[in-house]
Image (tube, helix red, strand yellow):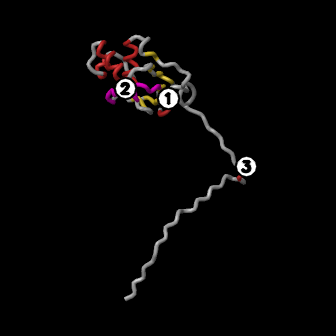
Amino acid sequence: MNVAHSAVIMREPTLYANTGGPMSRTRREKISSTLLGKGDGYIQCPLRIRLGLKFEDTHPVHCLEAILDAEGFRDPEELRCLYALPQEGLICMPLPAREKRLSVFQASKREVLEQALLLGLCTAQIFDPQRPVLWTETSLTRAVELFDPTGFYA
């Protein structure tokens, strides 16, 4: 009985990419364009809200918990009945560095709590009014612009 064992050699596939010309004619281009912030034209994703809190040298969660307690609330979920929230999901983008954040120590406590509530409903990419309010150092120190995508998906 002859049993032949064959060795299987696995090789990486060879990939060829043709740029349409010699290497001396290749180039790199940075593409920077967005549909976000467009309120006119065929596709619309207008800016709805800008959010960003400035805490100076304090811990964001402890600071907001103290404000929440001083205003008579037990937890951030209770703030939902105080403010009119967007009822639909929104797209989040980082707030440009040139935009100012709201100072926690100079602004009214209710204005700070409103921004904290909205930030607690955001991830880095979306605002979701159905998710629980999560106050973490990351969520409270995030600065974002919220855009309405309904003109894009209509």
**Upstream in sequence: badge 1 or badge 3:** 3
The magenta region covers 131-143
Q: Is residue 138 magenta?
A: yes
Residue 6 vs residue 40, the one in the foreground = 6
Which label sits on residue 25?
Answer: 3
Question: Which circle's residue, 3 or 2, is located before the other in the chain?
Answer: 3
Indicate left or right for 17 with 3 as reference: right
- The correct choice, above or below, for 13 with respect to 34 in the image is below
Q: Which mark is residue 94?
A: 1
| Residue pictured at 35% horizontal, 23% vertical | 61
**Residue at the spot of label 2:** 120
Question: Is 21 above or below relative to 90?
Answer: below
Q: CA distance from mark 3 to mark 2?
A: 49 Å
Residue type marked 1: Pro
In the image, residue 55 lies at what x, y percent? 43, 19
For the point 62% across and 55% down, the residue is 17
